Image (cartoon, rainbow, N blue to C red):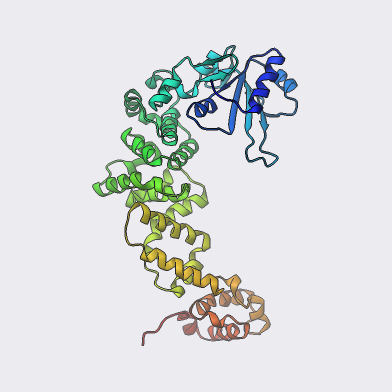
Amino acid sequence: MIKLPKEVSQALKALETAGFEGYAAGACVRECLMGNEPLDWDIITPAPLESLKEIFPKADIFSKTGSVLRIDKTKDGDEEGIILDISSYRKPGPDGKAQFCGSVEEDLGGRDFTINAIADHPSVSLKDPWQGREDIKKKMVRTISDPKEAFEKEPALMLKAILLAAELDFDLPKTAHEAMMEKAGLLENIPVSQRRELLSDIITAEHAGKGLRMLAASNLMPGLVGDAALDMTRRQRELFGELAEGIDQLKLVAERRLGLLYLCFEKKGPQAIEFLDYDDKTRQHLMDAMTELTKIFFIRDKEELKAYIYKIGMERYNYVHNLAKAQRIVYPAGNVKVENRHYLMEEIIAGKEPIFIEDLAVDAQDILDEGITDSQERAAYLLELLPAVVHQKPQLNKKKELLKYARRFNKSKLSAAFRGVKWLR
């Protein structure tokens, strides 16, 4: 038996008063049995949606098709409040969609893993028809049905099993590993968006290193990165192994961890990134992981740093810089370059040194008003030349000085071409 929050006990009591049984079920029960205090709770009951609406009139309808009501105690800013979902008994139908059923045992039997198929009502009984408690003790993620049949029917369960193992630091039984090896090709039947989401969840799990090792050992990586996972070189395998060993030391930032993952595939990294069809912003960051890390390594001073940030933008720079820091944690090496950029950036910020056009003391209209040109297009072009001046000499970020340079650049293509060039003595 587990100790229930008062909100859950009150909901069970309300169901009983209305003549319906109810049980706390699923991940919340699993977490309680592991000694944790979950904030997300699920109650299952034979009560249909119309009855649930009458019993809990203030609850939100979370899903009409699944007959799910939600009581969210976090809305009022209560950090200790819970989210409680109350749903009618259901199980997967022949077409994979949920269909309502008549008993708690049927509901539990339609779930994915034994450790998620436990239900409890402290004053009635604990339902554990598939020995989920025993698997919790063994720290094992086991499918309710035969793993080959389960993975054949729902290929995403292979990734979900590894995700659960990576979240809980559990293991998989040999039968599940063998079934994954045999059914790995079925990952192609999973929508790309779901594969992308599950990979992101695995790589940001508390024990992501274990998840990566399981993905590789179970031959599931080709379903996530494509041909890049085939015929990996010795160096690429070593990079992947070191990443699996060190990734749990990193902050739980998906794009940063994914960047390091794709770096393991070296020249094949870009094609691996394309495989999961990321949104434009994420794709840009991941591609920057492949192309920009080497470039920032060679930045020597503030002028070069400002010019680089001006070229790619602050957001992209921050991603690459933080990725370089993460890389040094996973693959221990000299940290001097990372620290040097950090100190340079601190000086730039402290000195309020201009980087972007928006930081300049002039704009295109000032150039027009000064009579340097009467063309809007030309004024905009001249304005774009001025950041190189203040990158080298931030003290020149004054209207009068910058207008002098704009006039000079307008008269001399040579001066414009050699703006910001350092001449060696």
Whether residue 355 appears in this view of the structure is: no
Say above or below: 198 vs 102.
below
Left/right placement of residue 373 relative to residue 342 reads right
Q: Quadrant of the C terminus?
A: bottom left
Image quadrant assignment for residue 332: bottom left
Determine the residue positioned at 52% across, 63% down.
314
Marker count (numbered): 0
Determine the residue positioned at 43% across, 46% down.
274
Q: Decide which of 369, 342 is in the foreground and name it.
A: 342
Say above or below: 98 vs 340.
above
| Position in image of residue 324 (x %, y %) | 40, 58
Image quadrant assignment for residue 91: top right
Whether residue 326 appears in this view of the structure is: yes
| Position in image of residue 319 (x %, y %) | 47, 57
| Position in image of residue 93 (x %, y %) | 54, 17
Q: Decide which of 34, 395 is in the foreground and name it.
A: 34
Left/right placement of residue 107 relative to residue 87 reads left
Say above or below: 178 vs 358.
above
Say above or below: 112 vs 237.
above
| Position in image of residue 398 (x %, y %) | 60, 82
